[in-house]
Amino acid sequence: MQIVVCVKQVPDTAAEKRLGGDLRLDRESVENVLNPFDEYAVEEALRLRDKHGGEVIALSMGPTRAAEAIRKAVAMGVNRGVLVSDPALAGSDALATSLVLAQAMRKIPFDLVVCGMQSTDALTGQVPAALAEHLGLPYHGYANWLEVNADRVTSHRTTEQGYDVVVSAVPALVSVTKAINEPRYPSLRGIMQSKRAEVQVWSLADLGVDPAAIGAAGARTRVRSFSPLPARSAGQVVRDEGNAAAMIVEYLVGRKII
């Protein structure tokens, strides 16, 4: 089984994030890491490979330093990595990102694509579904359980009533939640192998992507303005004198929470 797992390098979740003068996220002044949600996608891809055989290819889009995210995936057990990197990609939105990744996947034979449910830098969760649309693949979104055999993919997606069972043919694209597994820690051997691993790099010219469709100029979405969160105000203390439940309900109704 050939599995492509999409990974992204993002600013460390614990780092203070700032927008630059162009209203884009400043990624230079903070430590960057493998997107935590993608670790679950990597783990699920590795488990499927261990069960069915084949290989797992990590695919990423970003500047040259994004190769470090691929190396983290290799340290976890991924077989090899491909990075799409080109100066013209800077400022690409979710739609452009999905377009470029889809074009890269057309150069990689695969049976299954696995993605994390979202990235921690933007939290839109749009790329997996858009990627499936570009590739014409069945989409299993927000899967917390997955089973794959020779010709069928079955997943569970949690709902308010329980879970939906989603079934499709192979190939397919799956985005997974944190509930699906517990990612492994890279072994010392894996870390050493990742330092020597060759990451294949493709440019837009290699993929035949029109530069006008990507980057800041081709973005369909953009940040117009932003403001910092207001300081947290003091909480309201409710002392139970027999009417605490009613007071809490009144508070929630007044703020249209219930």
Image: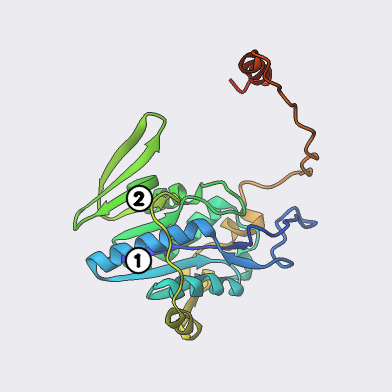
Q: Is residue 110 visible?
A: no
Closer to us: 8 or 35: 35
Closer to us: 237 or 71: 237
Q: Is residue 155 left or right of residue 213?
A: left
Specify the quadrant that holds the N terminus. bottom left
Q: Is residue 7 left or right of residue 17?
A: left
Identify which amino acid the numbered label 1 is placed on. Answer: Leu
Residue that label 2 marks: 136
Specify the quadrant that holds the C terminus. top right
Mark 1 vs 2, N-terminal side: 1
Residue that label 1 marks: 46
Rendered residue at 39%/62% (across/down) = 43
Q: Determine the secondary structure under disc 2.
A: loop
**Res 135 → quadrant:** bottom left
**Res 45 → quadrant:** bottom left
Q: How is the image coloured?
A: rainbow
Mark on residue 125? none
Identify which amino acid the numbered label 2 is placed on. Answer: Gly
Rendered residue at 75%/27% (across/down) = 236
Q: Position of residue 214 (x, y in %)?
A: 58, 58
Q: Give the spatial CA distance, label 1 vs label 2.
A: 24 Å
Q: Residues within 10 Å of mark 2 (few under 14, many from 20)?
A: few
